[in-house]
Image (cartoon, rainbow, N blue to C red):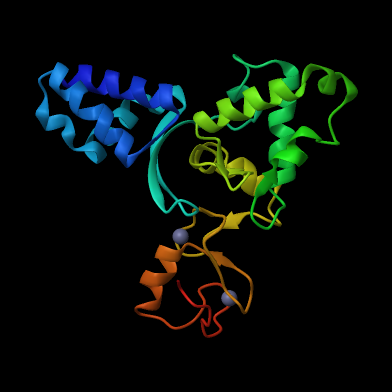
Amino acid sequence: MRDGVKKAFLQACINHGSLSTEQINDVLPPICQTYDADDALDVKKLVLEINNDLKELNQELSFIKHPLLDKEFLVFGLTFETLASKHQQHYTEADQMYFAKLVEIMAPQEDYSISWVDMYNLSSLTPTARKHLPKTRIQFLVKKWTDQGYFLEMDDKIYFGPRMLVEYASHLKTHYSDYIKDCPLCKKIVLWDIKCSGCGAKVHKECIRTFLKRNSNCPACSNVWSTALN
Ligand SMILES: [Zn+2]
Ligand SMILES: [Zn+2]
């Protein structure tokens, strides 16, 4: 019974790629009802149990707060290291190259975004890839990757989505270490959040808020913290 809930909920997570709290509240109760398992409604506990089963498969469910939306998501992610291994099954070589190029262009940007205009005109694509990627294919791919949680569309731009922050965290930190680092407090990837005006280190808002209750200095440079927290 509980195994049924776990299986069905995991399948929902895989299908969606990433689930907001509202989506979880839509998806989970009917599943519990089907399997007559009201005790499975504790999502955090359910996710822990599912992750235990997933370990050997290099898969993982994780909760992540997306700072641009200020919302928490449950993300299904593969924990393999390489970019290509995650996309091999469903995408052509040109598609995969396009994904990699998008990441390459977005990672060094101050807000980790790209505009639609730039997305249609990626200059670093090979002529062959370009031939396989007409505007309609690009629209299809970006829509699909957005639905899966890799990207996030806001104000006519595309940003890194919740799933990217989980699945590609170590890729991003390794390959774009000048631009993307860990939060000095929780040691997890930090992108937008808040910057120390002294040293420029980025820190999660929630982490620094908690930290400043007992401290007054930047956890990275030790100078007095002077950036407003709102
Ligand atoms: Zn943090
Ligand atoms: Zn600092």
From the top left corner, tell me how far across and down residue 44 is, in percent. 25, 40
Quadrant of residue 160 in the image? top right
Q: Residue furthest front?
A: 155
- In this rendering, the count of numbered labels is 0
Left or right of residue 101: residue 168: left
In this image, 135 relative to 141: left or right? right
Residue at image location 64% in from the left, 30% down from the top: 83
* Towards the viewer: 94 or 47: 94
Residue 25 shows up from this direction: yes
* Front residue of this view, candidates 121 and 24: 121
Q: Is residue 49 visible?
A: no
Residue 161: % across, % down:
53, 41
Looking at the image, which residue is at 55% across and 33% down? 146
- Depth check: give the residue in front, 43 or 141: 141
| Relative vertical location of residue 10 with respect to residue 111 in this rendering, above or below | above
Quadrant of the drawing holding the N terminus:
top left
Quarter of the view holding residue 51: top left
